Amino acid sequence: MPSRLRPTNSVAAEAILVGDPGRALLLAQSLLEQPKMSNHARGLWGYTGTTAAGRELSIQSTGMGGPSAALVLADLAELGVRRAIRIGTCTALTPDLGRGQLLAIAEAHAWGSGGAGASIYPDPELAGRLGEELGAAAAKATVASLDTLHVGGVPAPVTAGDAADMQTAALFGRGRDLGLAVAAVLIVTETATGEHLGDEELELAAKHSGAAAAASL
């Protein structure tokens, strides 16, 4: 039995991963026909159902931060997941990225007190399909994954990468160790100058990303 998830229904071999349980519900209602909750343990809502194309798909929340995401991915692997795409949010580090910009992540690295860790890459085939489905709406990018994005209300100091988040590097690394295909698309919810994306705009971006992810898996 997995250590964190307690599935009440079957889990598909293909999954979309989101940090926020509410976003998992949003995407389940948008992408799945008659979705059934497959996990509610620890507040990590997960849903499984069939897409309009007739493919079984799970949508699972991973909680906050890299350690939680890595644990959830390991549980999903034990339950039979073999391919997963993260749909997450991020803070832009460069001024050319505006609110709502979609980023197809081509490289990630964990960022600690000593700076950037080794580069970690998504599964090339899955990332390639995701990039094709996202099309011109998404830019290829490098993300720095931190334990926290803000310290004392001030953005954490990062000097490398196009954007910063809290999970992508951990998911790429854990996926590699488990032999899973993992890719990621991130939504810029905060610009380098501190402008924030509105809730309705975020929902639309998440749904667009979800449709592309579902078609890529």
Image (spheres, rainbow, N blue to C red):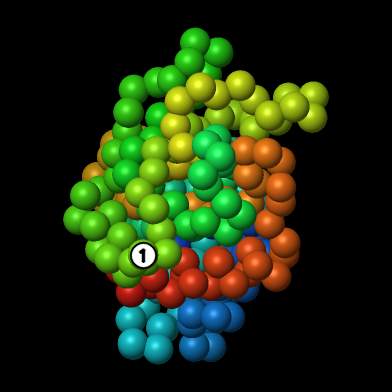
Q: Kindly identify the residue that appears in the image at 21 percent across and 49 percent down.
A: 124
Residue extending furthest toward the left: 125
Look at the image and tell me whether residue 172 can be seen.
no
Label 1 belongs to which residue?
136
48 shown above or below 179: below
217 shown above or below 5: below
Which quarter of the image is occupied by the C terminus?
bottom left
Dot 1 amino acid type: Ala
Front-lying residue, 115 or 53 = 115
Residue extending furthest toward the right: 152
The spot of residue 103 in percent (x, y) is 44, 52
Query: Residue 80 falls in which quadrant of the image?
Result: bottom left
Residue extending furthest toward the top: 114
Q: Kindly identify the residue that appears in the image at 43 percent across and 74 percent down.
A: 211
The spot of residue 77 in percent (x, y) is 36, 52
Q: How many marks?
A: 1
Front-lying residue, 6 or 199 = 199
* Mark 1: secondary structure: helix
**Badge 1 density bin: few <14, some 14–19, many ≥20, Cα 10 Å:** few
63 shown above or below 207: above
Front-lying residue, 148 or 49 = 148
Q: Kindly identify the residue that appears in the image at 71 percent across and 51 percent down.
A: 196
Front-lying residue, 147 or 158 = 158
Look at the image and tell me whether residue 152 can be seen.
yes
Query: Residue 55 falls in which quadrant of the image?
Result: bottom left
The spot of residue 178 in percent (x, y) is 29, 42
Q: Kindly identify the residue that appears in the image at 56 percent across and 39 percent down.
A: 95
**Left or right of 152, for residue 174:** left
The spot of residue 43 in percent (x, y) is 68, 56
**Left or right of 140, for residue 199:** right
